[in-house]
Amino acid sequence: MRLLLTSNGIANKSIAKVLRGWVKDIRFAFIPTAANMVDGDKHWLITDLVNCRKLGPVDIVDIAAVGKKTWLPRLKKANIIVVGGGDTKYLMSWMSKSGLKKELPRLLKTRVYMGISAGSIITGKTLNASSEFLYDTKYGARVAGLGLVDFAVRPHLNSPSFPKVKDKVLKKLCLKFDCTLYAIDDETAIKVEHGKPSVVSEGKWILYPKRRLTEKRLTEFETKIRVKKFTRKNLRF
């Protein structure tokens, strides 16, 4: 199984080189489903599609819009399945509802999986690296992911569009994870081959090793977050 987990798609030559090295005659199937719940200008989605098209033909397959009899044959025609960014929880919901979650292990025996943002996050065991869970004061709020990898990915490190995704914040929040956490910027990807991850980057990334969280430290961690939230939200001077 080969996966390329990105923050921003095929953002540079190093990321493109990995795909070219894996697949000679590239044919993409692009799943834009996560973008369905995001309003506003979709320049980022258009850019992702254009960058894919530079390497090969692109079919767009929305698993929330068509049934399995339609999407499965089209995914089988591709040799790289791209799962795009947007609403992580919505995307994971449709991965399960559509039946693609069950089909993926078979498809990926002969195809590459490329994730973009939400599409990268869902490959872990849980969605804890997604914004709606990462900043939740209820520790341990879990929604199951695809379980394709044994680490977590937090995209958009140091991005102006995601002001909380910085080292000083993630150093504390990484305690929420019972696995290794990779924080990657928009010029970085995690390459996974034969179950072994490696970093491909023309930017910056941070590895937060798995840390054991004792019950005492967990209580202290939750208390600090709640106090901080209460102070900012309720004390007006």
Image (cartoon, helix red, strand yellow):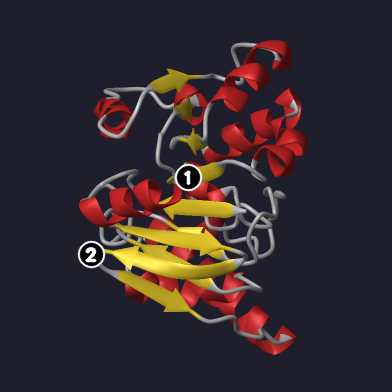
Left or right of 130: which side holds 109? right
Q: Nearer the viewer, residue 118 or 192?
A: 192
Q: Quadrant of the C terminus?
A: bottom left
Question: Image point 53% across, 52% down: which residue?
Answer: 3
Q: Nearer the viewer, residue 97 or 19?
A: 19
In the rendering, at what x and y percent does residue 47 appear?
25, 31
Classify 164 as above or below 215.
above
Left or right of 55: which side holds 19? right
Classify 237 as above or below 57.
below
Which residue does the numbered mark 2 point to in the structure image? Answer: 203
Question: Image point 62% across, 56% down: which residue?
Answer: 124
Q: Quadrant of residue 77?
A: top right
Task: Determine whether the residue tagged by mark 2 lies in a helix, strand or loop.
Answer: loop
Which residue does the numbered mark 1 point to in the structure image? Answer: 115
In the rendering, at what x and y percent does residue 114 appear?
47, 44
Q: Amino acid at mark 2?
A: Gly
How far is mark 2 from mark 1, CA to CA? 18 Å
Count up the numbered dots: 2
**Residue 7 visible:** no
Classify 47 as above or below 18.
above
Task: Determine whether the residue tagged by mark 1 lies in a helix, strand or loop.
Answer: strand
